Amino acid sequence: MQHSFFKTIKNSVKHWYIPLIIGILLILLGFYTISTPVASFLALTILFSWSFIISGLLEIVFAVQNKDEIEGWGWYLAGGILYTLFGALLFANPAMSAMTLTFVIGFYIMFRSIQLMAFSFDLKQYGSKNWGWITVWAVLGLIFSFILLWNPAFAGLSLVIWVALAIISIGFSACFLAFQLKGIKNKTADMSEEWKQKFQHLKDEFYQQRKG
């Protein structure tokens, strides 16, 4: 079955910087969480809710804008909707307990980590360099999410540190994804139309032979 991160070499990914914005937002959120470990859970819940809503909406925009360029744009759209719902859930229940907050954040980080790992493997198939860094940070995020979900009864400083490390991990993974998309976009833009057609023709022949 033919599968490629990009539907065609003729199209170039749009708004590659959106994952970068999301990544920077998450990294800043993580470091802020570490720097204010004594902040109330009410304040953290409100902060997380707005961050998740903003990142989710940005991801929805990225998915819609790239529906003709990225094969798996639907996963990005689904992820954006899911993350927006996570944020809305936190916003609607700002007084939730620490355990419930940990569960919500843990699932958010787990889903985003899995999504980033999937995209890193797609980038590997496309021949992108440094795709492994996306995987490394996503795996770290996945590990931290399992820790949060496995023992949501963490209290005080321990909970804050684990949450912050998890968010920072997926933030770095999103940043690496953005730079890989930028690199592919630049390569595509530098190719002449003739070379794009030749490349696409060779790729189609390759997949036809694999099917045969």
Image: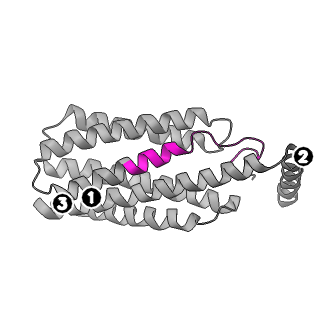
Q: Position of residue 193 (x, y in %)?
A: 86, 43
* 94 vs 178, nearest the viewer: 178
* 85 vs 42, nearest the viewer: 42
Query: How far, Cα to Cα, is label 1 from label 2?
Result: 48 Å
Would you say the magenta stretch is mainly helix, strand or loop?
loop
Q: Position of residue 3 (x, y in %)?
A: 71, 52
Name which residue type carries label 1.
Ala
Q: Position of residue 79 (x, y in %)?
A: 46, 42
Query: How far, Cα to Cα, is label 2 from label 3?
Result: 55 Å
Query: Which residues fall within the magenta stretch?
Result: 4-24
Is residue 18 rendered magenta in the image? yes
Q: Residues within 10 Å of mark 1 (few under 14, many from 20)?
A: many
Is residue 14 rendered magenta in the image? yes
Name which residue type carries label 2.
Glu
Query: How far, Cα to Cα, is label 1 from label 3?
Result: 8 Å
Res 155 → quadrant: bottom left
**In the displayed structure image, the side of residue 134 where residue 45 appears, left or right:** left
Q: Residue at x 63, y 35 (%)?
A: 67
Q: Residue at x 27, y 36 (%)?
A: 89
- For disc 2, the marked residue is 194
Of pointers 2 and 3, the one earlier in the residue sequence? 3
Q: Position of residue 163 (x, y in %)?
A: 25, 58
Label at residue 159: 3
**Residue 156 in view here:** yes
- For disc 1, the marked residue is 164
Name which residue type carries label 3.
Leu
User: Do the numbered discs 1 and 2 sit on residues whose CB atoms are within 8 Å?
Assistant: no
Q: Residues within 10 Å of mark 3 (few under 14, many from 20)?
A: some
Image vertical order of residue 77 relative to residue 29, above or below: above
